[in-house]
Amino acid sequence: MKILIADDHRLVVEAVADKLKELAPDVAVVTAGSVAELLSLLSDELDLAMLDLGMPGAQGLGHVREVLRRQPQLPVVVLSGDESPATMRAAIEAGARGFIPKAYSPDVMLSAVQLVLRGGTYVPPMMMAEAPLPATGARTAGPDPLTGQWAHALTERQRDVLNLLSQGQPNKVIGRTLGISEGTVKIHLAAIFRVLKVRNRTEAVVAARELTGS
């Protein structure tokens, strides 16, 4: 597995690279300190690119879009100190498969990367909190009641997690059922709690049942 980290802060690069080695024994990390260096290192051998927004040569999200233009199949994650929900949303809309604030813990970062490598998209809870909530008592048909406006508030995997949570399943069982780690389950739960404006699992279940009319 080969991962590119593009950031001009050496301490950040070294810390992230060290944590990424927990993904697999064969993880290889290449680094870039500027946009020019980043673009020169792009290749089909990369499995993931983690990009800072403020490195030399960067102009907004231009380098993110350029990487995706050159390597459209490459999963790109933004790793940034900017915690503005608007910036996060813009990055996801530009094609990034995740946005990880640098203030997050190494374990959360690693779980977010694992989610992206499995084909998912990591959205920070503070961005999810901006999404509109459906009116209380709204009813929908089908096995997954979290549709309509919920499609914009929660990802498909987060809806899966919430449905299993509503059945009383613990994190271990949720993770095993969905094929994800407990750390990833916790990331999804944090986002769910923010969207539902609740503090814990019990309140999330109650809120979900009220919102779906179940």
Image (tube, rainbow, N blue to C red):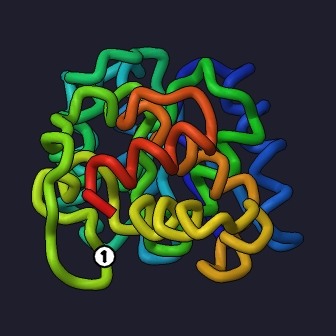
Up/down of 141 relative to 183, above or below:
below
The answer to whether residue 182 is seen in the rendering is: yes
Location of residue 21 in the rendering, given as x and y in whole percent from the top left corner: 82, 55
Q: Nearer the viewer, residue 73 or 209?
A: 209
Give the total of numbered labels.
1
> Left or right of 174: which side holds 85?
left
Q: Residues within 10 Å of mark 1 (few under 14, many from 20)?
A: few
Residue 130 located left or right of residue 10:
left
Quarter of the N terminus within the rendering: bottom right
Name the residue rendered at 47%, 67% in the picture. Answer: 163
Residue at x 32% of width, y 48% of height? 210
Does 213 sit above or below residue 174?
above
The residue shown at (56%, 46%) is 189
Horizontal side of residue 61 vs 154, given as left or right: left
Most foreground residue, 127 or 32: 127
User: Badge 1 is on which residue?
Assistant: 144
Q: Position of residue 178 (x, y in %)?
A: 60, 78
Q: Secondary structure at mark 1?
A: loop
Look at 54% across and 37% down and name the residue there.
203
Q: Position of residue 10 (x, y in %)?
A: 69, 22
Q: Quadrant of the C terminus?
A: bottom left
